[in-house]
Image (spheres, rainbow, N blue to C red):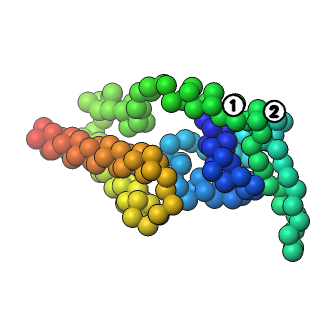
Amino acid sequence: MIPLLILGLLKQNPGSYGYELLALMEERHYKYIVNFTKGSFYYNLQQLEEKQYIERIDQLDDTRETHNYIITELGDKEFQKLMYKYGSRTDYINLSFYAAMLFANEYKSEELTRLIEIQIEQTKKKICLLEQSLEHNDTIPTYFRKMLENSRSHHLVNVQWFKELLKDIRKEN
């Protein structure tokens, strides 16, 4: 999915250099959509260049040379293909927490309570970051904004679910 992000960002920001694209991904909180690291980002950037989906244009500014990129015609076709591939899929939502919940009855209730409290705390932080992005970023494209709003709604539902789990544990004790 990282290639889709890179190609899409280059369509929006032609001539950007790698660090700019990575900074946009971080600023827009794409980590909530796709797991990526700095290394995986640059690896995918290199792969896209080798496959001739993007073209590097070296530019010299006052102090240094930058490697700027543009999407090629072949890259635009790949972008269209990836949009269909990921846009037509429906995936299950999997939280690592779900795996732990499979064995909740085998775990000490006070420890389980702590795990749920951690989930609530972490999820509230995600909600806060999403709300900050929505409030303070006028450059968010319409559909990305709607996606962030949807993500926030899912997290709010999860917080409610976690709180209900806590109530159930406390009733049992």
**From where the camera sits, is residue 114 visible?**
no
Question: Disc 2 and disc 1: Cα gap in Å?
Answer: 10 Å
Q: Which amino acid, mark 1? A: Glu
For this orientation, the residue located farthest to the bottom is 62
Residue depicted at x 67% and y 54%: 13
Query: What residue is shown with label 1?
Result: 78
Query: What residue is shown with label 2?
Result: 51
The one of 25 and 110 positioned closer to us in this rendering: 25
| Nearer to us: label 2 or label 1 | 1
Residue depicted at x 80% and y 55%: 68
Residue depicted at x 53% and y 49%: 30
How many labels sit on residues?
Answer: 2
Mark 2 crowdedness (10 Å alpha carbons): few <14, some 14-19, many ≥20:
few
**From where the camera sits, is residue 144 visible?**
yes
- The quadrant the N terminus occupies is top right
The one of 106 and 79 positioned closer to us in this rendering: 79
For this orientation, the residue located farthest to the left is 171
Left or right: where 1 falls relative to 88: right
The one of 122 and 32 positioned closer to us in this rendering: 32
Mark 1 crowdedness (10 Å alpha carbons): few <14, some 14-19, many ≥20:
some
Left or right: where 4 falls relative to 165: right
Residue depicted at x 15% and y 44%: 167
